[in-house]
Amino acid sequence: MISANLLAIFYLISGVLFILALRGLSSPETSRRGNLFGIIGMAIAIGVTIVSVGNFSTAFLYLLILLIIGGSIGSFIAFKIPMTAMPELVAGFHSLVGLAAVFVAISAFLNPEVFNLGSPGDIKIASLIEMSLGAAIGAITFTGSIIAFLKLRGIMSGSPITFLGQHYLNLILGISLIGLIIYLCKTQVDTWFWIIIAISFLIGILLIIPIGGADMPVVISMLNSYSGWAAAGIGFTLENTALIITGALVGSSGAILSYIMCKGMNRSFFNVILGGWGATDQTSSSSSKEQKPVKNGNADDAAFLMKNASSVIIVPGYGMAVAQAQHALREMVDALKKNGVKVSYAIHPVAGRMPGHMNVLLAEANVPYDEVFELEEINNDFANCDVAYVIGANDVTNPIAKSDPQSPIYGMPVLDVEKSKSVLFVKRSLSPGYAGIDNDLFYRDNTLMLFADAKKMTEEIVKSL
Amino acid sequence: MEIDPFIFRLSIFILSIFIGYYVVWSVTPSLHTPLMSVTNAISSVIIVGAIIAALAGDSVNLFDTANVFGYLAIILAAVNIFGGFLVTQRMLAMYKKKKDKK
């Protein structure tokens, strides 16, 4: 048994360790130690909670068994999951946090005595507000993440689902949610509590279905943030410092990532939330344009160009992840380096389906992280580079974002790929990217299109080298 | 005059948001995916609530609804804790610096 004060100090220590865990991520060298701090913080929080309750009867045995079951499932997933599936995995994990928050809120509502919140039917008003908020945000996180997971996994179509009056429906549901929470506080009747959770589940679904596939980086970050706020809500209910600190950290972390992703697309957060590009129906000039000539190349041409270049910049995108081309890509780069070519990688903030997606894939393929650069770091280098190898990226290289105010992506920061002496564009067809806009780059004189699967083409280039 | 303990918790919450703000801005963009998986793991500290709920039972009320929800939450959070930290570890282990020039 430990005193309440000592317990609070231990929770504070966990909270501090969690801060250090995030702090460690400021550089890859310190990150592994940071992760260790996180694990220690978690172990402390779990350990002291068990000791403080001090119940080592059958219930404790169940707890251990459940921990082992959950832990084995989690470990199994963590070791088996391919790196290309990280976005789905993170979305799936968010849904679990959300659902866990809902379950804890339900437990607290049904059995408030163990949490010192009053008795059933007479729960402290403040606690009731906190737990309904925690449950509501948790429920939204849960169903929202499930939808995000299904879309990322390709089980559900990535195209936005919109219907008339959608935003009004969401608004009405949101307002009724607040009304219900007030009503719950007045009456303490459990029916309202269940309805709050049910409506929140519905809101979670409605919130994510209108958002299109390429906006997933924003969605995942946003759900990350929600899972944090849900944890914080529960933290207030349980009067637990570790949970409050963590909730605030995770909530602000997700919010910042959402902001960075939105900025990478030059769109406002609300613009993303209210529906994808596909829904805005900006059928751009692509259909009206006459067929323009395109220079079509093969692997030998590409190999020849790159072998004789002095510097090559690689621009990976979501297509690389889909084709699992990262390993072939690294082989190609190794071969180029043997020929004395200087190679670096340029990563756009929204390349891929989640923040940092491309960096992880390249790291998996043993690409040293100091050869990988962010947009601002490398954008000026395109002018001095001989070949830009665009693999699986499209919209983030479109020069129209700089020149045409009519274009839906106008103002979006793009990689200045067109400034390099020649551009190799690996793509399966001439079809426009997610934004539905024709990429002017395809028709430039210095562009050579390589129509093929990203992985196959890269492998063929390796052979020709 | 006494200050409501809620205000203290609110202070911790607000200050933690600021800490989170500055700490997360200093995270290098190349580690944004591990950032998401590790925040996911630490937010599962919600398991402490589940543990309290689950351990509330003695032999009589082991399977009361409140306890059962506690058990379920423990499984979910445990999947997340182990899965989140381990997958982060796995990712971070892949980030390597350039080897010495040949």
Image (tube, rainbow, N blue to C red):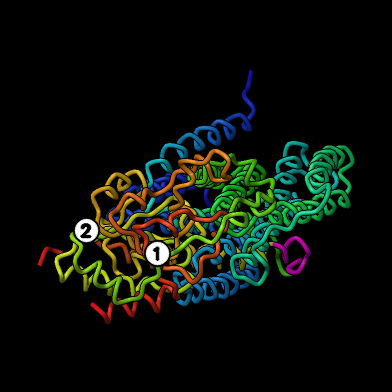
Left or right? Give the position of A39 relative to A305. right
The alpha-carbon separation of the residues under discs 1 and 2 comes to: 16 Å
- Marks 1,2: beta carbons within 8 A: no
Q: Position of residue A139 (x, y in %)?
A: 71, 54
Which residue does the numbered mark 1 point to in the structure image?
A: A425
Task: Report whether mark 1 lies on the same chain as mark 2.
Answer: yes
Q: Amino acid at mark 2?
A: Ser
Residue A5 appears in the rendering: no
Mark 2 secondary-structure assignment: strand
Which residue does the numbered mark 2 point to in the structure image?
A: A311
Q: Amino acid at mark 1?
A: Phe
Left or right? Give the position of B66 relative to B29. right
Which label belongs to residue A275?
none
Quadrant housing residue A309: bottom left
Residue at 80% x, 49% y: name it: A166
Q: Position of residue A357 (x, y in %)?
A: 44, 60
Compared with A294, A108 (above or below) is: above
In this view of the protein, which residue sits in the foreground, A71 or A25? A25
Q: In the picture, which quadrant includes the C terminus of chain A?
A: bottom left
Residue at 82% x, 43% y: name it: A168
